[in-house]
Amino acid sequence: MTTLKCVAIDDEPLALEIMKKYISEFPSLQLLRTFEDAVSGAEFLKKNKVDLLFIDIDMPDITGVDLVRALVEKPMVIFTTAHKNFAFEGFELQALDYLLKPINLKRFSAAVNKALDYAKYKSAEVTEDESLYVHSEYRMIKIVLKDIEYIESMQDYIKIYLLNSEKPILTLMSLKSVLEKLPANQFVRIHRSYAVAKSQIGSIHNRKVKLPSVELPVGNNYADFIKEWSK
């Protein structure tokens, strides 16, 4: 079983007590320390290996966002906050999740399960190339690979189109970089703007790839794909 060493930082004593109670409900979480003082918390994080950090965004000495930004070795981060309009503050830090106070156990549980899944993913415990994690809508999102139909490049961003979903997932990543994370036996680039799931290809005709929801062009530089497919 994966066990995550965690730390909680919040200048509100009551919020920390609730966090300690919730953490105690999960055998997979090992609480190392809690801190009301953000500076002391930052010093501990610099000297100790921590897998998961629960940290309040709005604190007097230093914000949670600035504290995490200053860390050289960053643990997985779940931000907590009492403010609804908060997520943009730590967008570039790619937090696993954001919890809005007052935090209920069900929502806390969902965030912890996400952290456990991501830890397994990073340690290669997930077998058979089952999933991909991307940062979208201020959270880390798990995508099951078999659900991907195709991926579209939008300059600095990509859109990941899923089967049976009208809304694509938008994430700050290049098509090249996402393909490096995907198994080559399952995905192929057919155009400078498109990559497709091989399992979703219905047919190829007139340099167009037919997928369940759309037809996509095959670029001139990727014509070899058609030859390989025809073998």
Image (cartoon, rainbow, N blue to C red):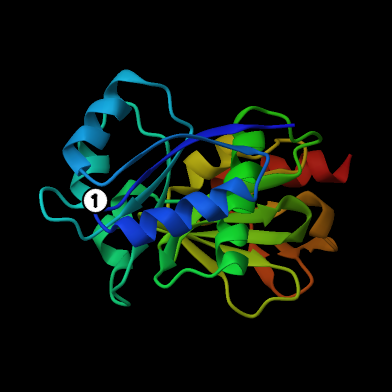
Work out whether residue 173 can be spotted: yes
Q: Please state if 119 lies on the left or on the right of 62 as rendered.
A: right
Relative to 212, is 4 above or below? above
Residue 124: quadrant of the picture = top right
Q: Residue 29: where, in percent of width, then height?
A: 59, 39
Residue sitting at 73 percent across and 30 percent down?
Answer: 125
Work out whether residue 151 can be spotted: no
Residue sitting at 55 percent across and 48 percent down?
Answer: 23
Q: Please state if 174 lies on the left or on the right of 217 as rendered.
A: left
Q: Residue furthest bottom?
A: 166
Residue sitting at 39 percent across and 49 percent down?
Answer: 94
Relative to 112, is 136 above or below? below
Query: Would you call the spot at circle 1 few (<14 residues within 10 Å), some (14-19), or many (20 or more)?
Result: many
Q: Residue 184: where, in percent of width, then height?
A: 70, 35
Q: Residue 149: where, in percent of width, then height?
A: 71, 62
Q: Residue 13: where, in percent of width, then height?
A: 31, 56
Q: Nearer the viewer, residue 216 or 95?
A: 95
Q: Which residue is mark 1?
A: 65
Q: Nearer the viewer, residue 5 or 135?
A: 5
User: Which quadrant, please, contains the C terminus?
Assistant: top right
Residue sitting at 46 percent across and 59 percent down?
Answer: 18
Q: Nearer the viewer, residue 124 or 14?
A: 14
Q: Amino acid at mark 1?
A: Val
Q: Nearer the viewer, residue 219 or 35?
A: 35
Residue 40: quadrant of the picture = top left
Q: Please state if 81 lies on the left or on the right of 26 as rendered.
A: left
Q: Residue furthest top?
A: 47
User: Which quadrant, please, contains the N terminus?
Assistant: top right
Relative to 183, is 58 above or below? below
Q: Residue furthest right?
A: 231
Relative to 45, is 12 above or below? below
